[in-house]
């Protein structure tokens, strides 16, 4: 029987796997006009955000350091 923690662990591992399988994108200055297609961020920011089972995860790290993921939370500047 899977628990909530098991489900969260699964989604985090899946988010990291999806991120690692994505083609590497070059780094460049963002000139986006904002979020599109229902995504929470602009396409440039979405490069490090992965959706698994309807939950967004922010990916941190790179190939040379350990990769981690945590639930994405949009910060408002109000």
Image (cartoon, helix red, strand yellow):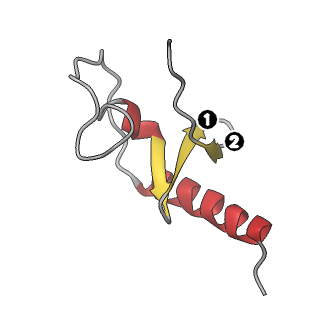
Q: Residue at x 62, y 45 (%)?
A: 71
Q: Which residue is mark 1?
A: 61
Q: Secondary structure at mark 1?
A: loop
Residue toward you, 61 or 37: 37
Residue 36 location in percent, x, y?
Answer: 23, 39
Numbered disc total = 2
Seen in the image, is 22 located left or right of residue 29? right
Residue 76 in the image: x percent, y percent? Answer: 50, 20
Q: Which residue does the image show at 29% across and 46% down from the upper left?
A: 38
Residue at 29 percent across and 33 percent down: it is: 35
Q: Dividing the picture into quarters, in which one does residue 59 lie?
A: top right
Q: Which residue is mark 2?
A: 66
Per the image, label 2 sits on a secondary structure element best described as: loop
* Mark 1 burial class by Cα count in 10 Å: few <14, some 14-19, many 20+: few
Residue 55, above or below 75: below
Q: Is residue 75 above or below residue 16?
A: above
User: Residue 58: x percent and y percent?
Assistant: 55, 40
* 65 left or right of 34 in image: right
Which of the two residues, 65 or 3, is positioned nearer the viewer here? 3
Name the residue located 30 percent from the left edge and 19 percent from the top edge.
28
- Disc 2, disc 1: CB below 8 Å? yes
Q: Position of residue 55 (x, y in %)?
A: 52, 55
Q: Residue furthest bottom?
A: 1
In the rendered image, the vertical position of residue 59 relative to residue 53, given as above or below:
above
Report whether 13 appears left or right of 33. right
Of label 2 and label 1, which has the lower sequence position? 1
How far separated are the C-alphas under marks 2 and 1?
Answer: 6 Å
- Answer few, some or many: residues within 10 Å of disc 2's Cα (few below 14, many 20 plus, some between 14 and 19): few
Picture quarter with the N terminus: bottom right
């Amino acid at each position: 029987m899977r628990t909530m923690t098991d489900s969260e662990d699964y989604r985090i591992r899946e988010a990291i796997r999806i991120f690692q399988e994505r083609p590497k994108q070059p780094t460049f200055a963002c000139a986006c006009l904002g979020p599109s297609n229902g995504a929470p961020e602009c396409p440039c920011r979405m490069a490090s955000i992965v959706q698994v089972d309807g939950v967004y995860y922010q990916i941190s790290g790179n190939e040379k350091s350990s990769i981690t993921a945590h639930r994405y939370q949009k910060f408002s500047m109000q």
